[in-house]
Structures are given as C-alpha cells and as structure tokens.
Image (spheres, grey):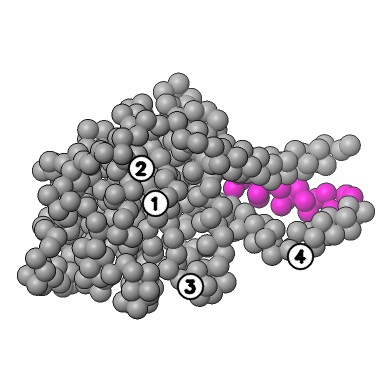
C-alpha cells in the first residue's frame, strides 16, 4: 500500500469515524437515566432577562408569551435589557406595561451600546434571585417551561440548564427540513453529554443559571461560554430533553449559513479555550466529552480539505477505486436519511472551516446579530397555533 493511499484511508477514518462513533455513543447515553438528586418541591425565585436591541417588531409578542408562563408571580421578575435601541422598542415595552397589570415587567435601559453580555452583566449586579434566566426576544416558551425546569436546579451539583430548540416552521422549505433533522441529531448528542456529565452548548432561547454559580456572563462566547465557566466551578450544565423553546428557522440557505458561521466561530473560540485548559490540566469537563468535541470543531474541518485533496490524488493513482467509490456514494445519497446526514456533515464542516479563518484573519464574527428574516416573517397566527400567546 502506497503512502498516499494509507494517509487517505487514515484521514477518512478519522473524519467520518469520530463523528459517527461519538454520535452513537452519546445517543446510547441519552437513553440512560439521570444521576441527579431532584427536589420536586423546589421553588426558587427567578429573574428572567430579555436582552433586546432594536426589536420593536417582536417585543410585544415576546411579552405576550412570557405573560402566559405559569409560575408564582412573587417569585418571578421580568426585565427587558435594552442595549441602546434606536427604534421604538422601549416605547413598545412601556405601552405594554401600561395596559397589562401582570406580570411585573421592568426595564434596564443602557444608553451606551455595550453588546449583549455587557448589558446583561450590568443588570446582573442588581439581581436578587435564586435563578437567572436568559431568553432571546425571538424565542417563545411553553407556559409550563419554568414549572418543569426548576426541579433540575434543585440538585446541588447542577449550576445551569438549557432547553431544546423547536422550530415553528419545520416544513417551510428544504432548508428548514434539514435544520430540523440537524437539530434532532445534535440535540441527542447534547442530552447524552448532559447525562454523562455536562454539555456547554447553550442557547439563548432558554438558559437558566443558579445565581450562586455565576459572577458574570461570558463576554467572548456568550451563553455557551458562561456554561463552560460554570462547569469549571465543578458544577454541571445540562440540556433537559423535556424542556423546549420555539423559534423560527431561516427559510433561505444563505441566511441559515450566515447564522451558522457566527455560531461556529462562537463554538470554535469555546473549544480552543477548552483545549488550552486541557493541555494545562485545568479542564473540569470529562475528556470523553472534551476530546471528541475539540476534534469535531477544530481539526475535522481541516481534515475535510486534506481528505478531498488526497481523494483526487488517489483517484489518479488508483483509477479502479473510482467505480466502487462511486457506487458507495450513490448508495449513501439514494436514501433520504443518509443523504441529509452526509450533506449536513459536509456543509457543517465547510462552515466550521470558514469560521476557522477568523483565527488567522483576526476577523471576529458578530455573536449577537439578529436574523431579520425571522423578525419579518414572525406573526401571531403561528404563535397562537402553538398556544404560545
């Protein structure tokens, strides 16, 4: 066997084998039980933060949604965290407050554009609550989400929990269909990580943190960075499968990719930090979670390029391999499930590769940049259908 062929096989084995093995292992772990000590009577005081920047189109719908959440009013504070909005966001909030007696809603109004984490940290200084919860303005909660969630925070070893992302428009286009498939696949991995120890993939739709476990929200990597900070204090960060929040997925591929590149950059910064902690022996997260995730987010995108380059060379050197390889690719793409899996694997690694360039070009993708498509297409009918308002 030639050196080129051996390298091609080895690179392919890592590129395809690591994600497949990790998915199968975590899928099995996701079906196991929780190793938690839960208190069903636990009823902490909560502070719900809704960060906004120029959200006049959707803030009223968000407040309607939060108003339906079932939780003792004396144990629930709601604060709209305004990051120097230049539109009518604050006017919309004030109009809502003046016409609705419940729930009690306050505004933290920053006159300086500080970014999401900066505003949240300023507001956090004045919070007197057991649990702080972040909810992005374009994400909507079922009314029972808090009553289901808080018992998981009763375990003294748990510092933070997050919820699954559920799409309001999964059937709209092939883009939303593929996103739904990706979400269901990746979230089973995050549940498996949670049951093993922790996941640090947190989303702003619903991210709840024990106040005692958090000193500030992470400036560099937002919700997931804050989850890693909490894990580093020897507490667990969990994705709870029974919890879900609803949001719209982009229907256009270009909008989906733009969002994913920002998220990928976000996650790569996170896993580079984890790698640095691992090298210096300071990473609390188990290696069985950290090492595969580091490979998938940092090294696998580069391996995709190496594998593609060696594939071209191997096909020239061993033309007889072209036929069986073509047959294998045809079989993979013949079935819908394997076709979508293969396309998502390639697409996501190309996105990660694009995001990886930020380390070399010193370009930082904006972590908090709302999708204007979701704002323009969101309407009351779809929310009423799901009984979210």
Q: CA distance from mark 4 to mark 3?
A: 24 Å
**Residue for badge 4:** 334
Q: Position of residue 118 (x, y in %)?
A: 21, 48
Q: Residue at x 20, y 46 (%)?
A: 46
For this orientation, the residue located farthest to the top is: 281
Q: Quadrant of the N terminus?
A: top right
Closer to the chain start, of discs 4 and 3, is: 3
Predominant secondary structure, magenta span? helix
The numbered mark at residue 243 is 1
Residue 375 sits in which quadrant? bottom left
Give the vertical position of 12 relative to 79 (above or below). above
What stretch of residues is rendered in magenta? 300-318
Q: Which mark is residue 161?
A: 2
Q: Earlier in the sequence, mark 1 or mark 3?
A: 1
Give residue 68's position: percent from left, percent from top: 24, 63
Dot 2 crowding, Cα within 10 Å, few <14, some 14–19, many 20+ = many
Pointer 1 and pointer 2: residues touching (CB < 8 Å)?
A: yes
The span from disc 1 to disc 2 (Cα, nearest Å) is 10 Å
Q: Position of residue 211 (x, y in %)?
A: 22, 37
Sequence-wise, which precedes: disc 3 or disc 2? 2
Mark 3 lies on a secondary structure that is: loop
Residue 348 shows in the view: yes
Q: Earlier in the sequence, mark 1 or mark 4?
A: 1
Q: Give the Cα separation between the discs numbered 4 and 2.
A: 39 Å
């Amino acid at each position: 066997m030639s050196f080129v062929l051996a390298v091609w096989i080895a690179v392919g084995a890592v590129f395809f084998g690591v994600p497949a093995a990790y998915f199968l292992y975590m899928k099995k772990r996701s079906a196991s039980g929780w190793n938690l000590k839960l208190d069903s009577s636990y009823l902490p005081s909560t502070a719900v933060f809704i960060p906004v920047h120029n959200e006049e189109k959707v803030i009223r719908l968000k407040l309607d949604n939060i108003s339906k959440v079932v939780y003792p009013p004396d144990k629930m504070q709601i604060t709209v965290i305004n990051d120097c909005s230049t539109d009518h966001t604050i006017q919309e909030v004030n109009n809502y407050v003046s016409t609705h007696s419940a729930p009690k809603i306050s505004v933290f109004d920053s006159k300086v554009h500080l970014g999401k984490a900066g505003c949240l940290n300023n507001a956090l200084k004045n919070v007197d609550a057991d649990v702080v919860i972040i909810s992005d303005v374009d994400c909507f909660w079922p009314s029972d989400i808090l009553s289901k969630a808080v018992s998981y925070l009763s375990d003294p070893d748990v510092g933070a929990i997050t919820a699954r992302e559920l799409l309001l428009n999964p059937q709209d286009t092939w883009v939303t269909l593929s996103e739904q498939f990706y979400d269901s696949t990746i979230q089973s991995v995050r549940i498996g990580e949670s049951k093993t120890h922790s996941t640090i993939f947190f989303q702003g739709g619903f991210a709840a943190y024990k106040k005692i476990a958090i000193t500030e929200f992470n400036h560099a990597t937002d919700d997931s960075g804050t989850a890693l900070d909490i894990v580093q204090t020897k507490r667990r960060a969990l994705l709870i499968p029974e919890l879900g929040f609803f949001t719209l997925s982009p229907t256009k591929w270009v909008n989906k990719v733009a969002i994913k590149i920002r998220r990928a950059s976000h996650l790569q910064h996170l896993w580079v930090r984890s790698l640095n902690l691992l090298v210096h022996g300071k990473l609390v997260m188990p290696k069985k979670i950290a090492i595969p995730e580091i490979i998938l987010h940092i090294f696998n995108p580069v391996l995709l390029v190496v594998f593609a380059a060696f594939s071209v060379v191997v096909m020239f050197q061993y033309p007889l391999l072209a036929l069986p390889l073509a047959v294998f690719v045809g079989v993979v793409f013949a079935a819908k499930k394997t076709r979508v899996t293969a396309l998502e694997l390639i697409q996501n690694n190309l996105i990660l590769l694009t995001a990886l360039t930020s380390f070399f070009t010193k370009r930082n993708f904006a972590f908090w940049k709302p999708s204007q498509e979701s704002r323009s297409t969101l309407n009351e009918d779809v929310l009423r259908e799901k009984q979210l308002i």
